[in-house]
Image: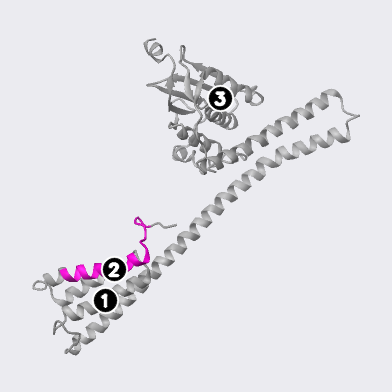
Amino acid sequence: MNHSPFPKPALKRQYLISVLSILVVATCCYLLSGLLGYMVVALILLLTVSLTAMFFDIKPVLTAAILSALVWNFFFIPPKFTLSIKSAEDGLMFLMYFIVASVNAVLTTKIRQMEKVARTREEKETTLKLYNTLLNSLSHELKTPISTIIGATDNLQSMADKLSELNKHELISEISKASLQLDRQVGNLLNMSRLESGFIKPKVDWFDINELIYSVLKELSDQTHNKPIHVAVKENLPLFKLDYGLLSQVLHNLVHNALMYIPKYAIITIRASCKENKLQLIVEDTGHGFPNEEIEKVFDKFYRLKNSKTGGTGLGLSIVKGFVEAMNGSVRLENMADGGARFIVEIPSELSYAQTYMKA
């Protein structure tokens, strides 16, 4: 990966730019030779070689170094317009200039190569760390439901004649819950893969936001039976023209995230409204909120809050952000003044009966 702010030109172009740089600088110095001594010119030419070394490969830079030495000798070291040097002091200075320019070119290029190797190593370490985090999270998240499925299935097969109908129903229910948990984790991985590949293309259609909210809550019914969830949707909302599937996944992840981390006494509230031709969807809770220093990081891939309980891959909120941005919207997190957290999703949308709604 090239981290330079300017893309590196092709090799032939590097030679051309290196040579032209030396000639242009030398011409300017020659025109000012009445003001500049030839020792000052040497420093300016050395600076030019150093600048080319910061961006170009070693061979074009060495070419620039050799050319600058010859130009300095021919046009500036007395006697001018000849490559001969009469003064021993000037001869020594020329030799030193040639060595310094060449060594400078080589060392600068080597430093750039070492920096590139260091960046590559750092990127690999970062990538490895992310994947280790993912694997560790997945190993924990997947181990429990897989063990549940294996155990329940084994009991159903080996003890079928000894189990009551209630026991069988409980085991089947456990298998169902564990399967849904596995499906969610695999779905998150697939969704993240789709986001990173740029495969997400919203398929918009008209829908009722109330229908979407209650559909998501029905999917989460196994997790919500012990925790109160309030739905506060403004009256007379228009239909919105958005991607129903993406938006339902956004709401699903936000509510699921709240259900996992809020305390038992906390209340979740889902709000929906129309604001300046945008759908505004809010999921808030009365829990502990988020540490202020971590709010900006919660949407990062694989990021999990410090001191949070085990479990989770750190993909849910990053998928929320990716899906919302795929629909040209925005999502932000803020702590509420009286405690708890609020996720605010805003997505521009076409509206049905928009004029009627605005007048209401």
Comparing 25 with 3, the one in front is: 25
| Label 1, label 3: how far apart the Cα atoms are | 75 Å
Dot 2 crowding, Cα within 10 Å, few <14, some 14–19, many 20+: many
Mark in front: 1 vs 3:
1
- Residue toward you, 167 or 274: 274
In this rendering, is residue 140 above or below 91?
A: above
Q: What amino acid does circle 2 point to?
A: Ser
Kindly indicate the quadrant of the structure image that contains residue 179: top right
Q: Residue at the spot x=67%, y=37% of the render?
A: 182
Q: Residue furthest left?
A: 34
Q: Secondary structure at mark 3?
A: loop
Whole-percent x, y for residue 344 in the image: 45, 28
Q: Is residue 335 left or right of residue 308?
A: left
**Residue 287 position in % (x across, y down):** 53, 28
Q: Label 3: which residue?
A: 266
Q: Which mark is residue 18?
A: 2
Please tell me which residue is depicted at 21% across the width and 70% down the height of the picture.
Answer: 23
Residue segment shown in magenta: 4-27
Q: Position of residue 315 (x, y in %)?
A: 56, 39
Q: Which residue is mark 1?
A: 67
